[in-house]
Amino acid sequence: MIRVHGVSKSYGGRRVLRDVSLHVREGEFVALTGPSGSGKTTLFKLLIGELKTDSGGVVVNGRNLSRLDAAGIAELRRELGLVFQEPHLIERLTVIDNISLSAEVAGRARNDARRLAEEALERVGLDDAAGCFPRDLCAGERQRVSIARALVNKPPIILADEPTLGLDPDQSLYVLKILTQACRDDGTSVLMATHDMEALSVLRGRVLVMSRGCILDEEGLEAACA
Amino acid sequence: MEYYFRRALDGIKASPAASGVAMASIAASVLFAGAVLLVSSNAYRMVARWAASGIDVSIYFTEQAAESDIVATKTRIGEDPAVIEARYISPDEGWQFLADNLDRSAELLAGLEPSVLPASLEIKLERALSDEELAARIQQWRALPGVSDVQSTRSIASGGSALDIVRWVAWALGALTLLVSVIIVATTFQLAAYTRRDEMNVLRLVGAVGPGYWGPVVLAGILEGILGALVALGVLAAVFQGVSLPIEGELPALTDVLSFLSARQCLTLTLWGAALGGAGSAVGMWRVSQWR
């Protein structure tokens, strides 16, 4: 599903990722943690084609990102469920329209998109907020709307970058529960970047630790903990 | 298509201020272009009518001119194949014509005798006559016995060259309008696109590409352009009505010359507004996408 091999990336002479490799299998939940500046978000941006690697290869859902042009990147994004630190909602659209927009962009007819959006809203427990505008919702609810948007096209992969950042513990747990359910019930692969320790403590998936642009192996972890 | 129209109208409704400014900039552009077109097409018609009416030449006789000289001059001129009409105007007829046309200022003639005016021959020549042919005739006629002066309406510019001047001025103003419009509208639409940058960013993140990404924004620009153009044409029509009626009152000869833009010209201006709106949106969106 996701394969990253020997990826390096630098900004202005500073190496942000150093020879990073990881593999996420079908239906697997992988959490990627590490301190701020360890390279999680950069890796996330490489996975969605927002940045290009300096070296190494990235394959997501069978697509080699180094060979994709802008249209190919857009096509890949339509296949993925993406959740960001910020919910990135369109303020002038209602909750249901924000979600169905993603389905329409993926080529669904309006009625079909709306039906799928209603289902997705139900999955995140916000079926009563369909007609609300994003400004009417609290931070946790807004993030749940963005997860519903990520789920609406029933993607094989969800990439979530710090989805619980800034949320209170209850909302964080709710968000994690939704992502875990998508992995368990739909067989969706989930790669979630987070440095929320409470969230990590309740997760049952694999946890990878990043530090200074590297994914630490067992030896590295021991050294980091020492 | 429904998706594009729905999102385009949503976009216009969501940012009324930005849409209003964009629409106003297009309206101003179309208003200016329309005014240039309206003035130049009416000026062209006036010059064309003047040019089509032939060349007027007046031959003035001296006070001492003998009747035989006048008759001989009229006969000789009448034999010229380029002469359409030659009419003798006596001092009395000239006086009457002046009195009739001075209207309220007729008192200026008080105390004067008709004999202060010279007798004249009013000649209409074929308009196809070249400047050189006309000049040669004027020179010959000035030398005729009893003739004091010869004057022509083509003394400043020929009808053909006047039409060329009108045409070139219209083209120059049109080109200037185009340049100014594109700059103003692109800048305005850049601001409009900037207000929609978050929405465009979300669309990009969810994988919108091609027409699905830019289509609604460009369509919104086209709709704003059409509305702006229609508003401008409405304003132009109202101003034309307000200006042309008093002019026609003062100058009845222009009654069937002055006219508003033709349906084809109105359609062209509306399409121009639509094109400006669409292109302005596309440029604005492209510029904003470069900022991220």
Image (cartoon, grey):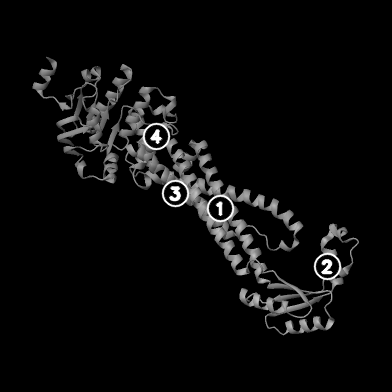
B113 vs B264, nearest the viewer: B113
Cα distance, mark 4 to mark 3? 21 Å
- Which residue is tagged 3? B279
Q: Quadrant of residue A188?
A: top left
Cβ–Cβ under 8 Å for marks 4 and 1: no
In the picture, the quarter occupied by the C terminus of chain A is top left
**Residue B215 image point, x, y percent:** 41, 46
Cβ–Cβ under 8 Å for marks 4 and 2: no
Q: Earlier in the sequence, mark 4 or mark 3?
A: 4
Cα distance, mark 4 to mark 2? 75 Å
Q: Which mark is residue B198?
A: 4
Q: With A26 as the anchor, is B49 left or right in this view?
A: right
Of marks 3 and 1, the one in the foreground: 1
Cα distance, mark 2 to mark 3? 59 Å
**Of all residues shown, which one is farthest toward the right?**
B111
Kindly identify the amino acid type of the residue bearing the numbered disc 2: Phe
**Of all residues shown, which one is farthest toward the top?**
A226
On the question of residue A125 being in view, the answer is no
Q: Are marks 3 and 1 on the same chain?
A: yes
- Which residue is tagged 1? B33
- Which residue is tagged 2? B97
Of marks 4 and 2, the one in the foreground: 2
